[in-house]
Image: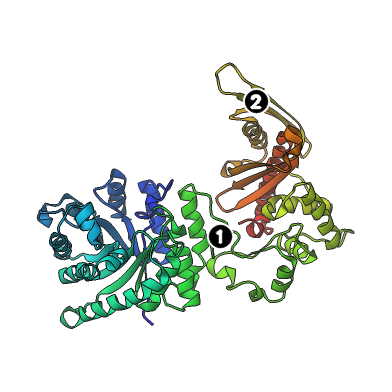
């Protein structure tokens, strides 16, 4: 079975997604992670298009990639000029990458109505550009932009653009579903036809080379992964995509799904198993670097990908995991999670307690009593299936195993509003750590921000590593609005450090009290994890919070 080549374009096409930005230095760190994972090609950007991409390629010259080939991306020569006079092509050569990816138009609509070009000149632009780059011993990947739309509109012309690329000496031809509107059943016959044409154009008898066929899909119909897999099954040997599916509009094909499907489901030799287990960490690293909240429902690598809530499901996976799991989550670096809620049975509680390293049933609190109490609390507004951090603390408190790392003595918050000026929030917190009292005050951009700042300031004297902990998300929900401003509210806080993400919850008729509950649980959870790690015990956050 022929190996499938993985071509990552997170650093170029991925950055066209809304709110996705990387500095040159961040792109270098991500590229090094891709290399470590074993990605075959890394498309670094478009040299000449921005100072950031120019700096990236300058920095990349000092990096010795072990597994990956770096690619610079650009367009065909401009209309009516020689390739040697084209500024963008010169910039591609100056990037000094072993691979150059060139896109050209394959849809006659774009050629004639968007570019105001002739069909003949467009073909010449493709051929001339590829020939020019091949003279400089570059591996050239031709990306046929809008190929599938072009094929459906004018089949003969779309195929001529591929012929121009292969006549110029292209090493690979990538068929792009640029608008993301092609359906899977449409992909397969087109891939088959192109595959047959490329085999006839094969140069293996003359120079020992064969022309690789690739696929590049977008997710506008939610089919980017499906279309990529169908293309591979039909003959494509290069798959382009991005980590986490980042990209323009609805995104690109998500390599965090494509890679395990190819490796584990289809048994294609595209990545070593030891590297496959790094996939979740890579997904998290890219989302962290992009400052994007990880998508919990993302297949394979998402926090919820192997989460189980129903009691029947949990009872089954404790006996035979594959009863409700299509793969072993550890194969992609993920972990099984059992959720506890008002839908839970005692199997959920027993599994979760074991996962968190807690003993139940030895002090008069069996799993049935715990389930009953959880259901009562969820009637009041708690939701433990989305707050693993608070669940752990609840189980510890309910079974008399809770050892607080700090205790609140009191806090006071004041809000000051002067005419047209923004509100100012001030918080004073008094806590106790092992009998030692600490009083601190701080300001913030709101009451919860001020409370957070004051608590951090107080705890910093005893726990110096809290600067690695950051608030990711803060949500407030009114549970039942019929009581107006006296309604019960639920506050959910998501926090993270360099290794993990965890959620905590608070419920009260007072929004500040609910916020304090969630905030205090978050710090207790973090400090408990730090203490367990330093003492050599199992980090309670290492399994329960992902």
Q: Quadrant of residue 60?
A: bottom left
Mark drawn on residue 409:
none
**Image side of residue 463 versus residue 98, left or right:** right
* Circle 2 Cα neighbour tier, 10 Å, few/some/many (<14 / 14–19 / ≥20): many
**Image side of residue 237 versus residue 348, left or right:** left
* Residue shown at the point (63%, 75%) measured from the top left: 322
Instruction: Give x and y (percent) for residue 95.
Output: 24, 54
**Image side of residue 502 versus residue 374, left or right:** left
Q: Quadrant of residue 195?
A: bottom left
Tell me which label, 2 or 1, sits earlier in the chain: 1
**Image side of residue 324 versus residue 207, left or right:** right
Instruction: Give x and y (percent) for residue 116.
Output: 18, 52
> Looking at this rendering, what residue extends furthest in the right direction?
364
The residue at which mark 1 appears reads as: 302
Mark 2–mark 1 contact, CB under 8 Å?
no
Q: Secondary structure at mark 1?
A: loop
The residue at which mark 2 appears reads as: 426
- Residue 254 visible in image: yes
* Residue shown at the point (35%, 55%) measured from the top left: 13
Q: Secondary structure at mark 2?
A: strand
* Circle 1 Cα neighbour tier, 10 Å, few/some/many (<14 / 14–19 / ≥20): many
Instruction: Give x and y (percent) for residue 309.
Output: 70, 62
Q: Quadrant of the C terminus?
A: bottom right
Query: How far is the residue under mark 2 from the one under mark 1?
Result: 38 Å
Mark 2 or 1, closer to the camera: 1
Instruction: Give x and y (percent) for residue 517.
Output: 73, 41
> Looking at this rendering, what residue extends furthest in the top direction?
419
- Residue 275 visible in image: no
């Amino acid at each position: 079975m022929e190996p499938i080549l993985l071509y990552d374009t997170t650093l170029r096409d991925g950055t066209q997604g809304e709110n996705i930005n990387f500095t040159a230095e961040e792109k270098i760190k991500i590229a090094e992670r891709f290399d470590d994972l074993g990605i075959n090609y890394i498309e670094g950007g478009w040299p000449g298009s921005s100072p950031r991409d120019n700096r990236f390629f300058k920095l990349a010259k000092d990096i010795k990639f072990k597994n990956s080939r770096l690619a610079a991306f650009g367009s065909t020569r401009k209309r009516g000029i020689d390739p040697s006079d084209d500024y963008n092509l010169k910039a591609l050569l100056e990037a000094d990458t072993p691979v150059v990816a060139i896109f050209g138009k394959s849809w006659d609509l774009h050629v004639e109505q968007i570019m105001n070009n002739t069909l003949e000149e467009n073909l010449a632009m493709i051929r001339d550009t590829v020939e020019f780059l091949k003279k400089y011993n570059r591996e050239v990947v031709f990306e046929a932009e809008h190929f599938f739309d072009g094929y459906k509109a004018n089949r003969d012309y779309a195929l001529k653009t591929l012929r121009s690329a292969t006549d110029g000496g292209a090493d690979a031809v990538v068929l792009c579903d640029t608008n993301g509107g092609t359906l899977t059943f449409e992909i397969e016959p087109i891939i088959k036809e192109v595959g047959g044409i490329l085999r006839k154009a094969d140069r293996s008898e003359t120079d020992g080379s064969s022309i690789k066929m690739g696929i590049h899909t977008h997710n506008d119909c939610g089919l980017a992964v499906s279309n990529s897999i169908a293309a591979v099954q039909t003959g494509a040997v290069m798959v382009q995509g991005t980590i986490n599916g980042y990209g323009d509009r609805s995104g690109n094909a998500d390599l965090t799904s494509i890679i395990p499907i190819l490796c584990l489901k289809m048994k294609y030799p595209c990545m070593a198993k030891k590297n496959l287990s790094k996939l979740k960490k890579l997904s998290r690293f890219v989302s962290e670097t992009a400052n994007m909240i990880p998508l919990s429902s993302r297949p394979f690598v998402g926090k919820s990908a192997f989460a189980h809530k129903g009691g029947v499901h949990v009872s089954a996976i404790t006996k035979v995991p594959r009863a409700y799991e299509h793969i072993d989550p550890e194969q992609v670096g993920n972990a099984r999670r059992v959720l506890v809620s008002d839908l839970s049975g005692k199997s959920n509680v027993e599994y979760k307690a074991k996962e968190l390293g807690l003993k139940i049933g030895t002090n008069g609190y069996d799993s049935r009593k715990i389930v009953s109490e959880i259901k009562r609390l969820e009637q009041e507004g708690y939701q433990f299936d989305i707050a693993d951090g608070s669940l752990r603390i609840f189980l510890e408190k309910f079974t008399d195993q809770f050892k607080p790392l700090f205790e609140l003595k009191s806090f006071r918050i004041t809000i000051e509003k002067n005419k047209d000026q923004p509100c100012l929030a001030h918080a004073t917190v008094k806590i106790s750590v092992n009998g030692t009292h600490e009083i601190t005050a701080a300001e913030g951009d709101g009451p919860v921000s001020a409370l957070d700042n004051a608590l951090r300031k107080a705890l910093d004297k005893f726990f110096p590593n809290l600067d690695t902990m950051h608030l990711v998300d803060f949500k407030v929900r009114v549970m039942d609005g019929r009581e107006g401003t006296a309604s019960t509210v639920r506050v959910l806080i998501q926090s993270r450090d360099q290794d993990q993400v965890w959620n905590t919850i608070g419920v009260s008729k007072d929004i500040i009290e609910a916020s304090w509950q969630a905030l205090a649980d978050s710090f207790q959870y973090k400090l408990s994890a730090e203490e367990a790690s330093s003492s050599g015990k199992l980090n309670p956050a290492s399994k329960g919070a992902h």
